[in-house]
Image (cartoon, rainbow, N blue to C red):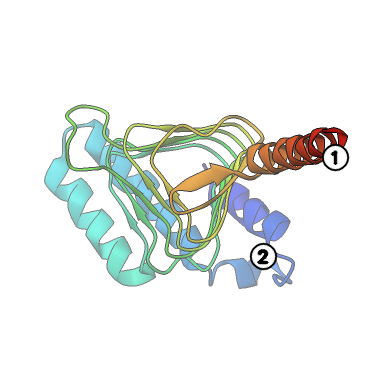
Amino acid sequence: MTAKKIIQAIRHNDPAIRSNREAWLYPGLWAVLLHRCANKHYRKHRFFLARLISQWARKLTGIEIHPGATIGHGLFIDHGAGVVIGETCIIGDNVLIFHGVTLGGTGKQDGKRHPTIHDGASIGAGATILGNIKIGTGAKIGAGALVISDVPNYTTFVGEPARNTRQEASLRSEINALKARVDELEKAV
């Protein structure tokens, strides 16, 4: 991905940005650009050089992206401080990540150990997503959520552990309807 496309993603997602020049000050831009460079070396098995670039990027931006992570186009890391993206993480296109997000492993797996984030997903500040799980297309993860299982497409998950907000609202509605029916039946007796 070129710097031009990253700048477009920044301008699209952040209403506070007023010029392309200002976008060059975003740590997320530098983190993604340097990741692209580190990832090229990683894929050519130049692991030390790849890691050196990624560590330099972390020091410069406060964003840690393992050089083995796969990142699609249009990733926007807003603010960015404290973001950690693990080695086997796969991030699709047009994903939005806020500061303090961890896309990590559980420490108990071999092979694919980190999450797959599908296109158009949004991950709130301080969210932690762990293990070889999938975050669906267009899904939203709330700030501070702890996600340890798959998240379906176009759903919103919040809490610790994270729960589907629509599913909870639907369950509450069903419970209230059942309570009302029980009250009716008790009055009839």
What amino acid does circle 1 point to? Lys
As measured in the structure, the alpha-carbon distance from the residue carrying label 2 to the one carrying label 1 is 68 Å
What amino acid does circle 2 point to? Asn
Decide: is 86 above or below 178. below
Q: Which residue is mark 1?
A: 187
Q: How many marks?
A: 2
Which percent across, then down, holds residue 181?
80, 34
Tell me if 37 is positioned left or right of 134 in this view: left
Front one among 185 and 76: 185
Which percent across, then down, holds residue 60?
34, 70
Mark 2 vs 1, N-terminal side: 2
Tell me if 14 is positioned left or right of 187 in this view: left
Choose top left, top right, bottom left or bottom right for residue 62. bottom left
Front one among 25 and 96: 96
The residue shown at (64%, 52%) is 9
Front one among 7 and 138: 138
